[in-house]
Image: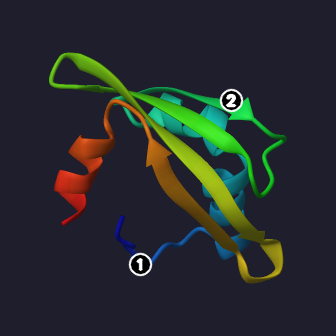
Amino acid sequence: MGVFTFEDEHISTVAPAKLYKAFAKDSDTIIPKVVEAIQSIEIIEGNGGPGTIKKLTVLEGGKSMYVLHKVEAIDEANLGYNYSLIGGSGLEHYKKNQI
C-alpha cells in the first residue's frame, strides 16, 4: 500500500470557517445535493469524529460504486480534516484518477 497526499488551494469570498463547516461538518447532507455524481454519504461506523467510517455512493458512467472513507483526524482550530480511502468497489477508479 502507498500513501497519497493531496492538497488543493482555492480563493473564495466565503469565510474559511463557513467553508470548513460545509465541507467537513455538514458534508454528509450538503455534498449529495450539490455534486450530481455523489448519490449519498452515510456513516457506517462511529459518530463523525476520528475513526468514523463513511460510505460514499457514486454514480459514474451509469454505474453505481462506493468508496469507504475513514476519518483520521479533525482539527477544528486549524480547519483541518484528514481521511483515508480504505475500501469499496470504486477504490480502483479513485486511484486511477488521483495519479
- Label 2: which residue? 44
Q: Is residue 94 left or right of residue 78?
A: left
Marks 1 and 2 close (CB-CB < 8 Å): no
User: Which residue is nearer to you in this view: 71 or 22?
Assistant: 71
Would you place residue 56 above or below residue 69 in this image? above
Name the image colouring: rainbow
Would you place residue 47 above or below residue 50 in this image? above
* Residue at the spot 22% in from the left edge and 18% down from the top edge: 63
Give coordinates of residue 67: x percent, y percent: 43, 37
- Is the residue marked by circle 1 packed among few (<14), some (14-19), or many (20+) residues within 10 Å? few
Identity of the amino acid at label 2? Answer: Ile
Q: Which image quadrant is residue 1 in?
A: bottom left
Kind of element beneath mark 2: strand
Observer-side mark, 1 or 2, equals 2
Disc 1 to disc 2, C-alpha distance = 26 Å
Give coordinates of residue 25: x percent, y percent: 73, 51
User: Which residue is nearer to you in this view: 98 or 78?
Assistant: 98
Q: Is residue 51 left or right of residue 40?
A: right
Kind of element beneath mark 1: loop
Which numbered disc covers residue 29? none
* Residue at the spot 18% in from the left edge and 16% down from the top edge: 62
Q: Which image quadrant is residue 97 in?
A: bottom left
* Residue at the spot 64% in from the left edge and 32% down from the top edge: 29
* Residue at the spot 39% in from the left edge and 73% down from the top edge: 3
Identity of the amino acid at label 1? Answer: Glu
- Label 1: which residue? 7
Give coordinates of residue 28: x percent, y percent: 64, 37
Disc nearer the start of the sequence (1/2): 1
